[in-house]
Amino acid sequence: LLLAAFALSCFIAYTMMRKWQIRQASKQIAVDPLLSGYALQQPTVVFFTTPMCQACKYQQGPILDRLNHQHGVQVIQVDASENAEAASKWGVMTAPTTFVLNKIGEVLFVNNGVTDEYVLKQQLGLQS
């Protein structure tokens, strides 16, 4: 019973953290200079990474490259170590972190850690 209560508490905390991250990111869309010069009228992934992140370089990066080349998904890569203030404002706590934006620039999903191609395609509306 204690284990179930602990698991439920962890799930609730994780869900609340993700909602907080989406709210934080949504506040930044209109004002963040990182996004200036990008057309947010297409599916977009904002990808926070760091130079030392091996999962970013060898797992998440290639997945996002494929989505860009095969489906025209716009990928905005942000070095969280160089842009620590932006990472903080977006609510980034780990690398990789991806924010999935729809065609009107709204944050739909936030993913902490490596997210596989199938999940990203679903989140971007590329899979039925």
Image (cartoon, helix red, strand yellow):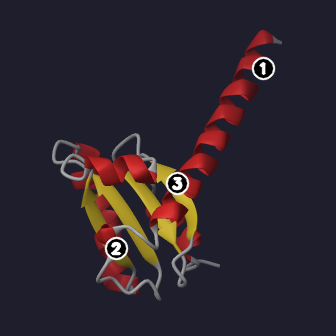
Residue type at numbered disc 2? Leu
Taking depth in this image into account, of 106 and 12 the one nearest to the observer is 106
Q: Which residue is mark 2?
A: 35
Q: Which residue is mark 3?
A: 24
| Extreme residue toward the right, this view | 1
Q: Give me the disc on residue 55.
A: none
Residue 82, image x, y percentages? 18, 51
Asked whether residue 61 is in view, the answer is yes
- Decide: few, some or many residues near mark 2? Use Cα within 10 Å; few <14, some 14-19, many ≥20: some
Whether tag 1 and tag 3 are in contact, CB under 8 A, the answer is: no
Q: Give me the disc on residue 4.
A: 1
Identify whether 78 is placed above or below 43. Answer: above
Identify whether 54 is placed above or below 116. Answer: above
Assign a secondary structure to mark 3: helix
Compared across the picture, whether 107 is left or right of 65 comes to right
Q: Quadrant of the N terminus?
A: top right
Residue 113, image x, y percentages? 42, 46
Assign a secondary structure to mark 1: helix
Spatial CA span between label 2 and label 3: 15 Å
